[in-house]
Amino acid sequence: MDDRARHRLQAYNLREWAMVRNIRVEAVDEVARPLIAAANEHPDGHVIPPHRHRRGQLIFGASGTIVLATPQGTWVMPPRRGMWIPPGVVHDVRMLGMTSIQSLYLEPEHAGDMPSRCQVVGISPFLQSLIAEAQEIPVDYDLEGRGGALMSLILHEMRRLPVLPLSLPFPDHAPLAQRCRLFVLKPSVHETIDEWCTPLGISRRAFTRLFRRETGLSFMTWRQQACLVAALPRLASGASITTVAIDLGYDNPAAFTTMFKRVLGEAPRAYLKQRR
């Protein structure tokens, strides 16, 4: 550890190193460890303005819902799920509900085989336990001891995270990006490719190729994910399934529930109940 890092850490009682809570990662960022754990709590409605981290960040939310936005898209992380943020990505964060977050900060040289863009990911019960245990070890854990072994195992598990369909990538193509942002303001499951082609002045075939090249998704998949990204924060805030379904253009709540269950594996009530 160099002198600058040592001076920063002297501001904290060494006995508190075992559980770093509610501090900025920059305060311990220079500790020479590949992975650093920290925990934070935020009230409902708390907003963290645009910022970036030198390290990559894996967030696990024990409670509350997180909405993260970058110039490239929007991601919604429900409770008991995770979110990967690559090193250096500018992002802002909005909290829905009292939010308890456990974070792992990964040195950039160890992030090469992690996703190159933000992703909402599944966190297995096993990894949840490992992340909780990581909060209990010193920031400057012994690389050759139990702490080093624990963090090494976490690194292996991080590389196996399943990606969840709760991201909404935005294209770089300016006119298409503007059309996507307008859709997000008022998403509808019934909007068609033809309704997008006309204002963009391109053919259906050209639109299909452009959309997939710019977002990595088909229009139908992107539209569905846009509806989910819009629905989850409202459901987490207490809006009824019926209201959300109708606002999104579904003919009835059952049709919305069927889509929700097909994509996320559970009906909305069960999904939200288990993750509060």
Image: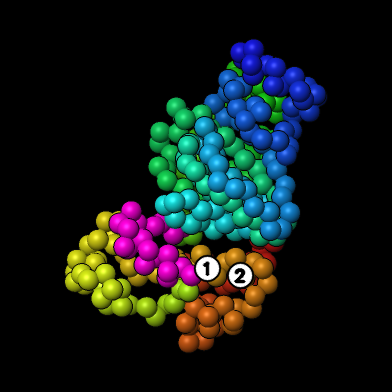
Q: Nearer the viewer, residue 261 or 212?
A: 212
What number is the disc on residue 17?
none
Q: CA distance from mark 1 to mark 2?
A: 7 Å
Is 218 situated left or right of 183 in this image?
left
Q: Is residue 195 above or below residue 177?
A: below
Label 1, residues with CA under 10 Å away: few <14, some 14-19, many ≥20: many
The picture places residue 249, in percent across and down from the top left corner, at 47, 82
**Magenta-span inclusion, residue 161:** no
Q: Residue at x 62, y 30 (%)?
A: 26
Q: Residue at x 48, y 74 (%)?
A: 186
Residue 276 seen from this side: yes
The picture places residue 204, in percent across and down from the top left corner, at 21, 72
The picture places residue 192, in percent across and down from the top left corner, at 32, 77
**Disc 2 element:** helix
Residue 224 seen from this side: no
Q: Is residue 93 above or below residue 108?
A: below
Instruction: Give the residues in magenta.
Output: 167-185
Q: Nearer the viewer, residue 27 or 38?
A: 27
> Three-letter amino acid code at disc 1?
Ala
Quarter of the image for residue 153 reads top right
Quadrant, the N terminus: top right
Residue at the spot of label 1: 230
Q: Residue at x 42, y 77 (%)?
A: 189
Q: Main secondary structure of the magenta part?
A: helix
Quadrant, the C terminus: bottom right
**Magenta-span inclusion, residue 172:** yes
Residue at the spot of label 2: 234
> Three-letter amino acid code at disc 2?
Arg
**Disc 1 element:** helix
| Circle 1/circle 2 CB separation < 8 Å | yes
Q: Nearer the viewer, residue 230 or 36?
A: 230
